[in-house]
Image (cartoon, helix red, strand yellow):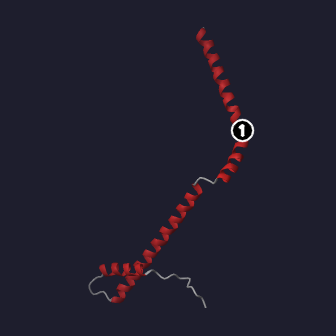
Amino acid sequence: MARYSKKQRPSEETTAEAMKIARATQRPGQTKEQTKLIANGIQKGIDQYKKQQKAKLREMNKRKKKDSPPTDDDALNQEITTLAPNQGKANKLPWMLLLFSWLLFAVYLLFSLR
């Protein structure tokens, strides 16, 4: 015997709100059964909307957690691994730029003195 049902029952607030909307849109000559059917449809729509909003909120929380700054240990480990491979390139770049600027300066002096 299962203690908990897999199918969740809608909240009383949702049921009451759906019935209120169904009664507000009730047409003359509409039976109570038809109104209940309309209320059930509205209730299912509300439940589906709430599920979608919860899923969006979970996705936003996942992205927020993923984008949040890492802890000190994680940051230190990541920093060490990212600095090691790029260290050689980082040291060469300023020297290459300095050499290139001196070459351009020499070319400028050669053409400007003539």
The residue located at (55%, 58%) in the rendering is 64
Q: Please identify the quadrant where the C terminus is shown.
A: top right
Please state which amino acid type lies under the numbered disc 1.
Gln
Q: Residue at x 38, y 81 (%)?
A: 16
Can residue 52 be seen here? The reply is yes
User: Hey, which residue is sitting farthest bottom in the picture?
Assistant: 1
Q: Residue furthest top?
A: 114
Task: Inspect this view and state whether residue 25 appears.
Answer: no
Residue 46, percent from left and from top: 43, 75
Q: Residue at x 63, y 54 (%)?
A: 71
Q: Is residue 62 above or below residue 7?
A: above
As drawn, 3 above or below 83: below
Q: Say which quarter of the image contains residue 27.
A: bottom left
Report the side of 47 relative to 93 (left or right): left
Instruction: Give SS at disc 1.
Output: helix
Q: Which residue is mark 1?
A: 87
Picture quadrant of residue 106: top right
Q: Residue furthest front?
A: 72
The percent position of residue 13, horizontal first and vertical second, equals 40, 79
Give x and y (percent) for residue 56: 50, 65
Task: Rate crowding at label 1 as few (under 14), some (14 to 19) or many (20 or more) other CA atoms within 10 Å.
Answer: few
Q: Quadrant of the N terminus?
A: bottom right
Horizontally, residue 20 falls left or right of residue 52, namely: left
> How many numbered discs?
1
Q: Position of residue 26 (x, y in %)?
A: 30, 82
